[in-house]
Amino acid sequence: MRIHLSLLLACLLAGTLHGTVALAQTAPVPQVKVDATRDPVDKSYRKMLQGVQRFERDHALAPQAVLRFRLLPRQPGVDMTGVRLRIAGDTVSIPLPLAEDNSFAPVHNAQAAREDAVLIANRKATTMSWRAQVITPGLPPGTRRLGDLRLECRAGMDSGLISNDPEIISWLSSMLYSTDKVCSQPDGNYLFFAERPLFGVTLVHGERRLALPFSMLYAGGEQTPASLPYCDCQVLLDRTYYAPLWDASWPDDTLLEFTYMDEVGP
């Protein structure tokens, strides 16, 4: 479910006049423990494990795939070479080796989970995006499998891998978004990233083919200079696409074929 920043801000302003008062009368305000030494880009280790559990539970969507997580640039000029990542808790510090594409395999550590550890990268907040990565081996080059994307969305959402919006907006978004809404409804609009700038995406299953409309490319074509900083597609906008995760008429073995900008002649 895509909620524009302006709508979120309007909700917040309205809440100061009416909604927040009503909320305070019916439910206690959640207490949030903030560690000033932690960079806001950090991700919860416990949440990451929830994503792993979702992957294992719904593995039938992509039975040959494995789960990894990937770091992507979010802002122009971000150097993604030499990124270092670790799990940090009160008493544990576990380095996570990154592959050449800056992806890593999840690691199970009971002590880190007990300590509510975080995943810390040696980059500033808002400079990187995080995504789950579910890829069936042996696919043709320039393609993704729809079942992989369905599982990727569920694991990513349960892992809390969403845009690093200002804290209060993220808190409001967490009340409006859910894995089921985002990954199973037409207006869920979970963003995926291709490897290179996209010209088009085509769904293929047997003899059936369908080109995705422009509204499913480039984050829907609705980003503005004001809203773009709140999207983790900020520097990768030309690589983004939505997939029809909700449409059961396209089975899990459906392929998405990518046509890249550098493949199209002048």
Image (cartoon, rainbow, N blue to C red):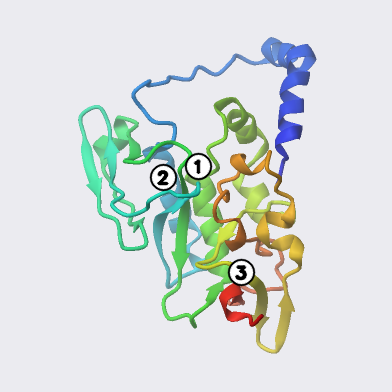
Q: Amino acid at mark 1?
A: Gly
Q: Given contact means CB atoms under 8 Å apart, are the residues at marks 1 and 3 in contact?
A: no
Nearer to me, 17 or 9: 9
150 displayed left or right of 87: right
Q: Position of residue 250 (x, y in %)?
A: 68, 73
Q: Which mark is residue 48?
A: 2
Q: Quadrant of the C terminus?
A: bottom right
Q: Amino acid at mark 3?
A: Leu
Q: Which residue is mark 1?
A: 160
Element class at badge 1: loop
Name which of mark 3 and mark 2 comes first in the sequence.
2
Circle 3 or circle 2, nearest the eye: 3
State the CA–CA distance, disc 1 to disc 3. 26 Å
User: Few, some or many C-alpha atoms within 10 Å of disc 3 (few <14, some 14-19, many ≥20)?
Assistant: many
183 to 86, vertically: above or below: below
Name which of mark 1 and mark 3 comes first in the sequence.
1
Nearer to me, 112 or 203: 203
Q: Which residue is mark 3?
A: 198
Nearer to me, 255 or 58: 255
State the CA–CA distance, disc 3 to disc 2. 29 Å
Q: Given contact means CB atoms under 8 Å apart, are the residues at marks 2 and 1 in contact?
A: yes
**Residue under the image location 46 percent in, 51 percent down:** 73
Q: Position of residue 74 (x, y in %)?
A: 50, 48
User: Which quadrant would residue 87 be assigned to in this image?
Assistant: top left
171 to 250, vertically: above or below: above
